[in-house]
Structures are given as C-alpha cells and as structure tokens.
Image (cartoon, rainbow, N blue to C red):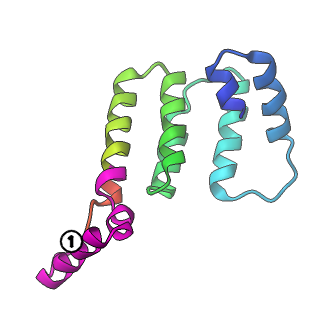
Amino acid sequence: MAFYYLLNQDPDNFNRYADVAINCKAKLSEGEELLKDALVSVKQGNKDVVEVGKKLLEMYPNDPNSYNNLIYFQSLSDDPSGMVVTLKKAKRARKHGFLVRMRSHGGQKVVQRRRLKGRAQLALKSRNV
C-alpha cells in the first residue's frame, strides 16, 4: 500500500503505511524483506530501487506482483523504456507461460505433444521473461 500511495503522490499516506510496514515485527519471507528494504531506501530519499525489483523477479518469476513491483520501481527511477520492456515480458508470460498452458485442455495437449517430441523447453522459460 505504501508504494501505491507514493505513486499517487500522497506523501502523508505513504509515510503512514511505510512506517507501519518498516516497524512490523512479524516474520517476513525473503521477498518481503526485500520490499521492506526498498521502503527504507525510498523513505531515506534514494529512489534507485530497480535492482530490488529485479531480484524479486528472479525470486518469483511466475508471480504477476513481482512484475508490478518492478514497474513501480522503474517509474520511481524515471525509467520509461524499462517499464515498457517489463510490461511486454509480463504480458508474454501471462499468455504463453507453463501455468497458462496447463489451465486448458488444449494447452495441456500442447505440453503433452512437446513432451512426446522430447522438447527440453515445454513452455516459455520464466528466466527469459
């Protein structure tokens, strides 16, 4: 929520939500720790947090939220060309990814045919996304 308010230029709500997230005592996953570090960095005035977004994308390549976070970080860093590339890759993953193939009967048949043919890559590689 803090990044949402930051992008919508609402500094009061950003500071309030960021303080709550930073002072959270709950056990956090590795990805949540990265987001917390990004919040601390942004609150200190450092808006170059694109590397944090890229690390999140490496950790969770199939999660659309990791693409959204990267886009948020790229917009904070004024990187419009990177945002376009990220959006295109996210769209490609949502259309041609393994999980999308496995949702429908036709997609399952595509994966089955690729397995029978001996293809090493059954669907879009998440690393290339």
Position in image of residue 129 (x %, y %): 33, 50
Which residue does the image show at 23% across and 75% down from the upper left? 109
Relative to the observer, which residue lies in front, 86 or 78?
Answer: 86
Instruction: Determine whether, in the image, residue 104 is placed left or right of residue 60.
Output: left
Report which residue position mark 1 lands on.
110
Type of the residue with mark 1: Val
Which residue does the image show at 75% across and 56% down from the upper left? 28
Q: Is residue 109 magenta?
A: yes
Residues shaded magenta? 93-121
How many numbered callouts? 1
| Quarter location, residue 5 | top right
Q: Is residue 76 magenta?
A: no
**Compared with residue 106, is residue 93 higher up or lower down, i.e. above or below?**
above
Work out whether residue 129 can be spotted: no
Position in image of residue 34 (x %, y %): 64, 47
Instruction: Determine whether, in the image, residue 85 is placed left or right of residue 50.
Output: left
Instruction: Provide the secondary structure element on which disc 1 rests.
Output: helix
Instruction: Determine whether, in the image, residue 15 is placed left or right of residue 4.
Output: right
Position in image of residue 42 (x %, y %): 67, 27
In the image, farthest residue toward the left: 117
Which residue does the image show at 72% across and 24% down from the upper left? 44
